[in-house]
Image (spheres, rainbow, N blue to C red):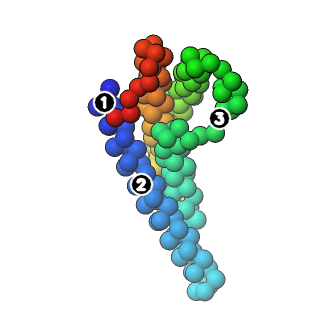
Amino acid sequence: MSFIRKTLDRVNFLAEYAVCALLAVMVVVVFLQVIFRFVIRSSLPWSEELARYLMVWIVFLGASIGVKRKSHIGVEAVVAMLPDSMRRWTSILVNALCCVFFVFMVHYGRMILRVVSSQLSPAMEISMAIPYSAVFVGGALMFAHCFFQMVELMIEAISGRAVKNA
């Protein structure tokens, strides 16, 4: 269990740095587009497309980071009124439902990749599999984090004690 946690922590660490790098590149590209459009009076034809694809990757990687940190929004008012044992099982149920959704994301992301792999983007002429693979990668990361959290909660609920955060 510790090996899986360490592996997911490393993957999340890489995702965090990737999001930071992608965001920095996106800021530079958008800034250059503004300079070129309003100062030089000639726009860069590829900048808007690149910024859009970077944003897609940032969103899906950021969502996986949010799942890892358990920082997505939730309705805690109802759950807070439940006894401890019911809270654990409610959290397990929520994680299970999220895992089902993430499996659908991965499945449809894989199907989309098959369809768009031969298509090229209009301005940059890169394979459309690159931007669309964010759905697959983000869904897979979200599933991995959510599934591991669900397993930890199940172990905690069965044993009746909190799982140590090593």
Location of mark 1 (residue): 2
**Residue 133, relative to residue 74: is it above or below?**
below
Is there a contact, CB below 8 Å, between mark 1 and mark 3? no
Say what amino acid the circle numbered 3 marks: Gly
Residue 137 at x, y percent in the picture: 45, 40
Tell which of 158 and 13 is nearer to you.
158
Crowd tier of the residue under label 2, counting other residues whose Cα lies within 10 Å: few below 14, some 14–19, many 20 or above: some
Q: Distance of mark 1 from mark 2, alpha carbons?
A: 24 Å
Q: Say which element carries label 3.
A: loop
Location of mark 3 (residue): 74
**Residue 36, relative to residue 99: is it above or below?**
below
Q: Quadrant of the C terminus?
A: top left
- Please name the residue shown 51% across and 57% down the image: 54
Q: First in sequence, mark 1 or 3: give its number.
A: 1
Q: Residue furthest top?
A: 158
Tell which of 152 and 101 is nearer to you.
152
Say what amino acid the circle numbered 1 marks: Ser
- Please name the residue shown 38% across and 33% down the image: 165
Is there a contact, CB below 8 Å, between mark 3 and mark 2? no
